[in-house]
């Protein structure tokens, strides 16, 4: 193991200290070109090839970078400075070197419908402050968002208009109107994005396509008929037009006024069934269920018998032989269908 003398250790320590305490004055044959806006320094001095080969490459490059960075910092400290939050900041000038972009510059955003209308009518946008005076709470509040001024959603009492239905829920009406406004704004936002990307926006309802099928045409006709004020009640049908399928069943409710004899009879029937000691039995349903169970039992017995399906023999499992004891067809090869009992299903 090599031993280090005290002189070598001291020499190394002095060298490290000298590296830390280098002078801020750097002498170059040619002055550097500076672009302080981009914090860029351009050194046109040719590097010394002899020093690069004799000394270590890393140390040579590190010292060269240190000298150029020192010259750049010297130029930055010559700029006017100011103190911001107890920190000294230098005001950089406008950059002079045009640096290339990685990607092309973004295209300007196309104007929305409102912006086009405002430009056509000469409407100028006025910037509003974020705070406004609330007369109810007697304080300044936000204009929009949480805890905003004139927030009508926090009112516990609403006035019923003279033209409105007195039994109508004004709170539910207000919430519904707000949801409709939010949905309308979202629809307009998506339409603006589609217009900016030059995408065709379908209208409300059925979107037209190039070639529509028969079912699509029938659905379009049905929707057009239901779009009237009478919901298609008085619309005449076309010749050979069939009734639409899978349109859903409409619930029918009993009238609230008029004859209540049918409703009374229904309630009496329900009470009669609940009060009866014997449960009500549907004879047809019970007979059909019994017949199905018998048919399934006979099929399972026949499938469980062993034997060959073809050929002749006297075995018990023979279904096709003429002299066999099993039940089978005399013509051979075809099983006889199970007998079906007559009855109402």
Image (cartoon, grey):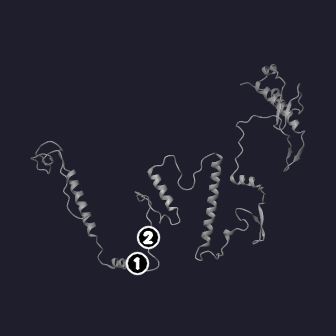
Looking at this view, is 204 or 144 the one in front? 204
Answer left or right for 200 relative to 74.
left
Residue 267 image offset from top left, x and y in percent: 39, 78
Looking at this view, is 203 or 327 the one in front? 203
Answer left or right for 283 relative to 51.
left
Answer left or right for 302 relative to 169.
left
Q: Quadrant of residue 172?
A: bottom right
Badge 2: how crowded within 10 Å, few (<14), some, or many (20+)?
Answer: few
- Mark 1 = which residue? 263
Residue 197 image offset from top left, x and y in percent: 64, 45
Looking at this view, is 58 or 182 the one in front? 182
Looking at this view, is 334 or 275 the one in front? 334
Q: In which quarter of the image is residue 313?
A: top left
Residue 6 lies, with reference to residue 170, above or below; the image says above
Residue 138 image offset from top left, x and y in percent: 78, 71
- Mark 2 = which residue? 252
SS label for mark 2:
loop
In the rendered structure, are the residues bearing label 2 and label 1 in contact, judged by CB atoms less than 8 Å apart?
no
Quarter of the rendering occupied by the C terminus: bottom left
Residue in view at x 44 percent, y 52 percent? 215
Quarter of the rendering occupied by the N terminus: top right
Residue in view at x 30 percent, y 73 percent? 280
Residue in view at x 21 percent, y 56 percent? 298
Residue 303 lies, with reference to residue 290, above or below; the image says above
SS label for mark 1:
helix
Residue 266 visible to the viewer: yes
Answer left or right for 187 relative to 64.
left
């Amino acid at each position: 193991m090599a031993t280090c003398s005290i002189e070598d250790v001291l020499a190394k320590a002095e060298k490290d200290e000298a590296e830390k305490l280098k002078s801020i004055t750097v002498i170059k044959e040619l002055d550097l070109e500076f672009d302080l806006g981009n914090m860029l320094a351009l050194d046109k001095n040719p590097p010394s090839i002899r020093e690069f080969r004799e000394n270590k490459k890393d140390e040579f490059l590190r010292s060269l970078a240190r000298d150029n960075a020192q010259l750049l910092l010297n130029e930055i400290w010559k700029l006017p400075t100011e103190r911001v939050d107890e920190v000294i900041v230098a005001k950089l000038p406008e950059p002079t070197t045009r640096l290339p972009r990685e990607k092309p510059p973004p295209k300007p955003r196309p104007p929305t419908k409102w912006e086009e209308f405002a430009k056509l009518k000469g409407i100028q946008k006025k910037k509003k402050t974020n705070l406004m005076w609330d007369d109810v709470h007697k304080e300044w509040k936000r204009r929009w968002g949480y805890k905003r001024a004139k927030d009508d959603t926090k009112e516990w009492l609403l006035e019923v208009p003279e033209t409105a239905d007195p039994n109508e829920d004004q709170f539910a009406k207000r919430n519904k109107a707000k949801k409709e406004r939010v949905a309308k704004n979202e629809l307009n936002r998506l339409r603006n994005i589609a217009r900016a990307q030059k995408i065709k926006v379908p209208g409300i309802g059925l979107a037209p396509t190039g070639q529509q099928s028969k079912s699509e045409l029938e659905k379009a006709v049905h929707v057009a008929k239901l779009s009237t004020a009478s919901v298609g009640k008085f619309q005449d049908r076309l010749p050979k037009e069939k009734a639409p399928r899978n349109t859903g069943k409409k619930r029918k409710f009993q009238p609230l006024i008029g004859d209540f004899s049918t409703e009374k009879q229904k309630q009496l029937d329900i009470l009669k069934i609940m009060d009866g000691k014997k449960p009500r039995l549907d004879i047809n349903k019970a007979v059909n269920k019994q017949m199905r169970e018998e048919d399934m039992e006979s099929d399972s017995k026949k499938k469980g018998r062993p034997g060959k399906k073809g050929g002749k023999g006297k075995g018990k499992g023979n279904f096709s032989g003429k002299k066999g004891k099993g039940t089978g067809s005399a013509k051979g090869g075809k099983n006889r269908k199970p007998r079906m009992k007559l009855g109402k299903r």
